[in-house]
Amino acid sequence: MMSERVQKALFFTWLTSVLATFGSLFFSEVMDFIPCEKCWYQRILMYPLVILYGIALARKDLRYGAAGLFMSGLGVLVAAYHYGMQKLPFLKEAGDGCSVVSCGSTYINWGGFITIPLLSFTAFTIIFVCHLWMVRTNK
């Protein structure tokens, strides 16, 4: 049985994945930003988290979201690398040969550092840390 604190954390984790999913769809479908190759990898890792954590939340059983820990951890790495392609000169060249859209290009650059991969990194990190906390607390 899950404690109320773990259930709230699970809801927050699920909500983070929902917001990240709708955010990525907003950028591509409303703003007409074409996702680059690394963006697609991040989407592949994020979108299923809505379902996994949704089922875990509905059944009040964190085991249904177990794959989310691996997927969010991998998402942190992909998003960090993608952000590096945008901001670090020695990785910028690696992003230029990605696909139709360069992985090094930036559609948004709020405050000079907030880009779409940073938003993705933040969401994956929140999900990963929350999941670790829930596993540790739920024992």
Image: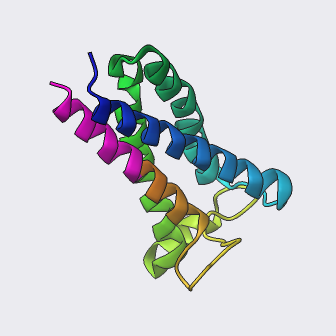
Residue at point 67% right, 73% down?
108
- In which quadrant will I find the C terminus? top left
Residue extending furthest toward the bottom: 112
Residue nearer the viewer, 5 or 103: 5
- Work out whether residue 70 can be spotted: no
Number of labels in the image equals 0
Magenta stretch bounds: 125-139
Image location (x, y in percent) of residue 30:
84, 56
In this image, 107 relative to 56: left or right? right
Q: Residue 42: where, in percent of width, then height?
A: 55, 46
Residue at the farthest front position = 4
- 115 versus 16 height, above or below: below
- Render colour scheme: rainbow
Residue 53 belongs to magenta span: no
User: Is residue 133 among the parts visible in the rendering?
Assistant: yes
**Does 118 sit above or below residue 134?**
below
For residue 36, what is the image quadrant? bottom right
Residue drawn at the location 26% of the way across and 34% of the way down:
134
Measured from the top left, where is residue 47 in percent x and y? 60, 35
Q: Residue, x 42% and y 35% (percent of image)?
A: 71
User: Which residue is at 39% across, 18% downward?
Assistant: 60
> Which of 108/130 is in front?
130
Left or right of 128 in this view: 26 = right
**Quarter of the N terminus within the rendering:** top left
Q: Is residue 2 above or below residue 8?
A: above
Q: Main secondary structure of the magenta part?
A: helix
Where residue 68 sits: x, y (%)? 41, 31
